[in-house]
Structure formats: structure tokens, C-alpha cells
Amino acid sequence: MSSVFGNKLQIEVWGASHAPEIGITMRGLPKDIEIDLERVQEFLDRRKGGKNAYSTKRSEADTPDLKSGVIFPPDQSKERVVRTTGDALTAVFYNQNTRSSDYDEMKYVPRPSHADFTSYMKYGDELTRSGGGIFSGRLTLPICFAGAVCMQMLEKQGIRVFGHVLSIGKIEDEKFDPCNPDAGKIGTGENHFPVLDASAGEKMVAFMTQCAEEGDSVGGCVEIAVTGLPVGVGEPLYDSMEAMISHMMFGIPAVKGIAFGSGFECSEMKGSECNDPFCIKDGQVKTISNHSGGIQGGISNGMPVIVKVAFKPTPSIYKEQRTVNMKDLTETTLSLKGRHDPCIVPRALPCDEAACAIAIYNLLLESEKKQLPVVEKNGLSSARAEIDSLDEQIASLIAKRFDVAKTIAAMKKGQGTQIKNTAREEEVLSNVGAIAGSEKEEYVKNIYRKMMDETCRFEENCD
């Protein structure tokens, strides 16, 4: 069973948590684009488990085996940069650290708030549900691979996607400046938690560790920012920026909510508070505030895109819970075994960045075929376009004027009349000057004097 997303850029994810392998195929990538595999691996490592007390103890290599779609350099030991061929890019990840026996008890005893019950009712025994099966967070690994590739594509166009943990339970980090989010403020590295306020991060880590010790779990939110996105990306209605990003986001297990810009806070505002007034900044149209989250009418408006994503607590907890046995339809209790995240949020952050990058790159490819008008200071591009249109008309009329002049030249030569007629030229200059008006009379007359000189030269050379 596989899952497919996208139109211009299409990704297909397959496999299951405890299957021999999981993987992804990307169709629609341009040809001859470089991909830095070291950077891809660094991104994939951000979602790895087994690194701390608040994540699963399952640890996998998470190294992609690229089967098609790229050309490797002759000596891979010196350079880990591959080049796309334009064909489908397929990457496979091998599952090695699995313990399916941990899930034997749950075959017919569903975990509360997990997909165990609904998947059994829909598919019966057709699917293996060990480790969550196709509903497992393990399937976010190939999504992160595709996202890491798309991020490198976007960066080549000056577009960046980054995020931070906004909250764990009721502990909150600072929010991005919606008009000027800064990736440089986010804690990074082995000993840093991805927050803007390090003290908030310390409290979050302590709380997640406490939940793990208690055999419980906790939810939270992440905040994603996209900078450098041009105006005009996205479509109205069902292919809007919000719709496409949401479509990808809800492919990540445990996502229960998404908001753009000020989101639900907008419902508590007046229009005078929520509207984003326009201004001119560095010769471009911008907005003073960014409650819209960089999107209006489903289309990017040139401001940073701000996305908030909410995650429920991981349903797999070690505390005893009420459930049922679906074989004999009796009530029972369940105490979990296995390796589970007490909080999915930190590992889900790169998954959200990846989902956002995939959706935006898909929309960007869709927009490339369309001519997007550029709004500049004083409407310069629009004015130039109008000049171009007028020049086209003027050049056409001048060419027709020369055609008539050729006929006149033949008549003059037949009659033995001089080509240059000063009185006629003065009459023409008087007429066009009156049409131009006093402000532009001198300039128009100068243009016509030059044109009449060229007309005489043209008539003299006519056979």
C-alpha cells in the first residue's frame, strides 16, 4: 500500500514500520539539479530517536539507498553531491531495529486514540499493525528525505523553510516575529533544543522527561516560517497555499490542528486590528503587520509564510488504559510494551519543515509556467509595459507612414517636384504641436522634425 501527494511534483510513500523497508519515489524533479547528500543526512538525523530520555529508544541508521533518478560522482568518497536525471528519484530505507513481538498483545486489543481500531475495522487482518504499520511515525522518514531535497531546490531560489518548538504542554516558547522571522535565533546542535528562548527549552525538556518517567505522554505545537517566497505562488480554492500545506501536514501522524498567521486569534479581533495595511518597502509592496501569515486568497503575498501545527500526545503510553478485545467483544485493559515517544513534537519539527517544503515546491513548479505581474515602486513595471504597447502601435503607424511617403515620392518624381517641401513641413509641425498641447509641444515637434528628415531621405532613395 502506498500514499501519493502532489501534481507537478508527485511523491509516493510506501512500506510500514516493521516491514523490511520503507521508501519514497519523487516524480517531476527538474533535470541537472545538484543534491548535497551530506546535508540531506544531517536533516534526516534531526528526526532520529534513541538520543535522549524524551524520545523512543528505537534507533535506525536512516541512511537513504538511492535506487534511481540521480547520477553519482565518479569518486563518492570525495564528494557526496549527486545530480538529478529528470527521471523518478527513488530512495529506500531499511528497517533493522524492529521488535514486532512487542505488539503481539495489541493485534486485537487497540490502543486508545490510535489507528489500531479504525485500521482493523477497515482492513481486517490484511495489514500488519506492528509498530503502527502504515500509520507509524516511521513513515515520516521518507517524507523528510523528500523535504530535504525540496529545501535545497528552494534555497537555490532564495527561499528558506525553518521552525522551532512553540510549546510542550502549557510551556511556551517565544513566537516568531511574523514580519521578520530569524532562523539564526533557533537553538541548534547536539546539546541545544530548537527554541528561541533557551530557558523555555530547558523547562520543556524537563517536563517531557518527567512524562517519560511516569509512563505518560504530552503534546505540543511547532511554528514554521518560510522566507523569500515571491508573490503569486498558490491557487484559489483547493490548490491554495493553505490547502496544499495542510494536505501534506496531515500526512504526519498525531497532527490535530493547523493555523496560518494569527490563525484562531483572528476570530477574536476586529477587522481594523486583523487587517494587514500595505506599505512600500525597498521599492516593493509589503504589509505592515502579518496576521494573514503571508497568504491572501490562497496566494503568497511576499511576506513570510507563518504556519503553526498542533500535535496530540502520543497515544502509546505505559499507563494502564481501558480498551476492548475486538475478537470476543469484551472490555479489557492494556499496559503497553515496546519503545514509544513520550512526546513526538521535537522529532516532528523537521517533518513539518519537510511537509511545508514539499507543498511549496510543488506549488512553485506550478507557478513557473504562469506570467506573474511584478508590482514595483511607482508601478514601474506596469508603466513600462504600457510604454512597450504604445511603442508597438507607434512603430506600426510610422511604417505605414513611410509606405504612403513612398507613393508620394513616386508622384513627386513623376511631376519633377522637389522632395523637400518646407511649407508642408511647417504645416505638419503646427498640427502635431497643437495635438500635443503646450507642455509637450516642443518635444513632439523635435521628434517630427527628425522623422520628416528621415522621410525625405527615404523618399530620395525610393526607386
Image (spheres, rainbow, N blue to C red):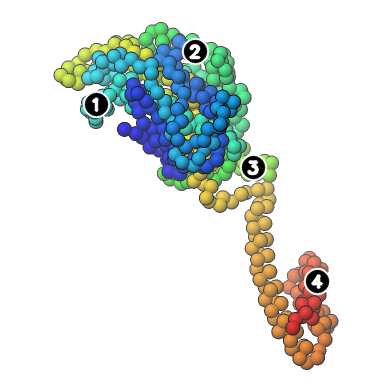
**Placement of 453 over or under 184, stated as above or below:** below
Q: Is the residue under label 1 in contact with that under label 2 (CB below 8 Å)?
A: no
Number of the label disc, if any, that sits on residue 133? none
Mark 4 or mark 1, which is nearer the start of the sequence?
Answer: 1
Mark drawn on residue 205 = 2
Q: Can see residue 296?
A: no
Q: Residues within 10 Å of mark 4 (few under 14, many from 20)?
A: few
Residue at image location 57% in from the left, 39% down from the top: 229
The image shows residue 393 at horizontal and vertical percentages of 65, 68
Q: Which quadrant holds residue 399?
A: bottom right
Report, in whole angstroms, how far the alpha carbon at label 4 lies from the one at label 2: 80 Å
Q: Distance between the residues labelled 1 and 3?
A: 55 Å
Residue at 78% over, 88% down = 413
Quarter holding the C terminus is bottom right
Could you tell whether 399 is left or right of 445 in the image? left
State the SS at label 3: strand
The earlier-in-sequence mark between 2 and 3 is 2
Name which residue type carries label 3. Cys
User: Which residue is identified by label 1?
Assistant: 120
